Image: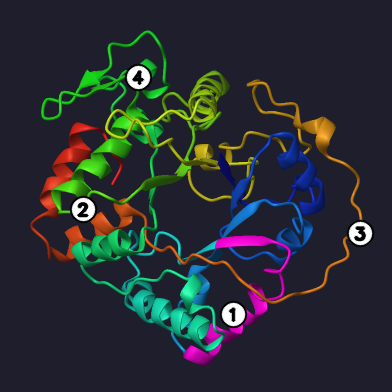
Amino acid sequence: MGINYGQIANNLPSPSKVVGLLQSLNVSKVKLYDADPNVLLAFANTNVEFIIGIGNEYLQSVPDAAKAQAWIETHVKPYIGRTKITCITVGNEVVAGNDTQLVNNLVPAMQSVYKALVNLGLDKQVTVTTAHSLNILLSFHSQTGYPFLINAYPFFAYKGSPGEVSLDYALFGSNNQGMTDPVTNLHYDNMLYAQVDAVYTAIKAMGHSNIEVKVSETGWPSKGDADEVGATPQNAGLYNGNLFKRVQARQGTPAKPSVPIDVHVFALFNENMKPGPASERNYGLFYPDGSPVYNIGFHGANYLPEDTDIAYTSASGINVSLSILFLHFLITFVKKVKLFVELLYIVSLCRVFHCSV
């Protein structure tokens, strides 16, 4: 069970306080969108695994080999001895945007980061891809055994078509008829599992059957603008509460029943400075004071201790996985440049299962 720790806010508790909160929730995996040294320092010796990110602002400079190595030496090497950094992502939603320069810089940045890790003697513990083709990318994941990361939000499907998508189906409710895949004859009682299996099916159709799909982001907002149907505390509580129960039960999807679904929930806190619609600022499980936004059995405020000084010494050694593009961003990119006919199959699957691509 993991959680996304976003920090686009000016009222959040210090990272040292967040340590106690996450430990009280038994959260063992955290995803950052940067490599905040204060967070990495605070979580030393906690056994919490981190995904850290090289932000889009670095994609202009990181293609330079020297600057890529400087980034690794500054943001990874000092912390890796005591803080469990297990994954690095290069860029965030790059190919889904309209900045062609960022897109052009992405692969060179990935190559430079890889070369930097080689220079530091860390390349044997790192996964990296420079493939331009989705097929080549999937071949890489198949060979290395590393998971494929996706963002899956049933909320967006419901928000976009509330008259066609059952709210109960989107919220893991027990009072919905679900849907049956006419091709596989598998029955789905919730949309998230259908979205995940749509990705599995698309990957299999392209000749790969041994790639695990993990959900690096999913969640439901507790508040939204007037036109954001379904964004309420009750619905958010139902979605995340029901999801937690399934994760705790180590439940798999209908297509992969023996593979427990792996999820990072978005997000730990409401982030009051995020741009966009109101929902973007209201995905948090907690308010900044540690009190829960809605009741799903968490009582975080009791686990926000006073700040304490943290002694830290840097150490060598690393166990890093460099995982880069989420599937729906790749799909968007390849669709735009119209390189691969096979992606039409993926798009059709996502339409059937209400994926947000």
At label 1, the amino acid type is Trp
At label 4, the amino acid type is Tyr
At label 2, the amino acid type is His
Q: CA distance from mark 2 to mark 3?
A: 49 Å
Residue at the image position 25 percent from the left and 56 percent from the top:
332
Q: Mark 4: which secondary structure? A: helix
- Callout 4–callout 3 Cβ contact below 8 Å: no
> 107 or 261: which is nearer to us?
261
Q: Mark 1: which secondary structure? A: helix
Circle 4 sits on which residue? 169
Residue at the image position 57 percent from the left and 67 percent from the top:
319
Circle 3 sits on which residue? 309
> 260 or 129: which is nearer to us?
260
Among the two numbered marks 1 and 2 on one chain, the one whose residue lies closer to the N terminus: 1
Identify the magenta region.
65-86
Circle 2 sits on which residue? 208
In the image, residue 116 above or below residue 215: below
Q: Mark 3: which secondary structure? A: loop
Q: Position of residue 325 (x, y in %)?
A: 37, 60
Residue at the image position 11 percent from the left and 50 percent from the top:
344
Among the two numbered marks 2 and 3 on one chain, the one whose residue lies closer to the N terminus: 2
